[in-house]
Image: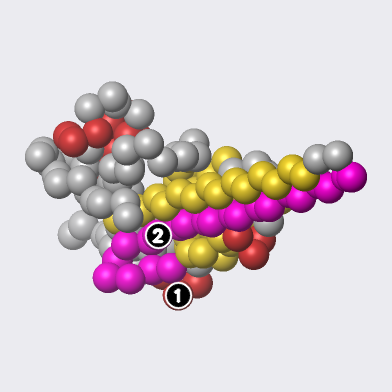
Amino acid sequence: MTTLAPTKKNVSLSNVFDDFFNDDFLNMPSFFAFTNQKGAFMPNVNVIENTENFEIELTAPGLENKDFKAEVKNGVLTISAEKEEEIKEEDKNFRKREFSYSSFSRSFVLPDNVTADKIDANYKNGILKLTLPKKNSSPKTPAKQIKIG
């Protein structure tokens, strides 16, 4: 199971992504924070912020849609996958049987402005892409001129 890293410093949204790629993961902000399991396969991840949403791109070639599981619980998005394979070959002179198992789990603490029940996921060409829409905090209104008397 992937565990969340404790936050050791306060970081503004403007430098979250600078810290995201820092080698010192224990000092990461809680925004999209994670640590990984020792010895487990850990796919690379891109986190992209747009005006209307966040995007998470996770590289996981060789898997299928059915291998993935994604869930949000208590403000934490967890993406995991498991794949088992068995290859059997038999001939009159030999018998070959190979097994393989791979898995991973990545967790991300979601910011408060994500609409968790509208997260969308799509797996194509070895990339799992999740779109996390932002909540509309307030409708955009044009600037209003104030007359000073």
- Judged from the image, the secondary structure of the residue bearing numbered disc 1 is helix
Q: Give the color scheme: rainbow, by chain, secondary structure or one colour.
A: secondary structure
Q: Which amino acid type corresponds to the residue marked 1 in the rendered image? A: Asp
Residue shown at the point (48%, 64%) measured from the top left: 70
- Numbered circle sitting on residue 88: none
Q: Which amino acid type corresponds to the residue marked 2 in the rendered image? A: Thr
- Judged from the image, the secondary structure of the residue bearing numbered disc 2 is strand
> Can you name the residue that lies furthest to the right here?
92
Relative depth, front residue between 50 and 54:
54
> Can you name the residue that lies furthest to the bottom here?
117
Relative depth, front residue between 1 and 144:
1
The quarter of the picture where residue 39 lies is: top left
Question: Label 1, on which residue?
Answer: 117
In the image, taking residue 34 as reference, residue 6 lies left or right, namely: left
- Numbered circle sitting on residue 78: 2
**Residue 124 percent across, percent down from the top left:** 71, 50
Q: Does the magenta stretch include residue 91?
A: yes
Relative depth, front residue between 57 and 13:
57
- Give the dominant element type of the magenta stretch: helix, strand or loop: strand
Q: Label 1 crowding class (10 Å Cα cut-off): few <14, some 14-19, many 20+?
A: few
Front: mark 1 or 2: 2
In the image, taking residue 52 as reference, residue 19 lies left or right, namely: left
Q: Label 2 crowding class (10 Å Cα cut-off): few <14, some 14-19, many 20+?
A: some
Which residues are the magenta region?
71-92
Residue 112 visible in the current orientation: yes
Residue shown at the point (86%, 39%) measured from the top left: 93
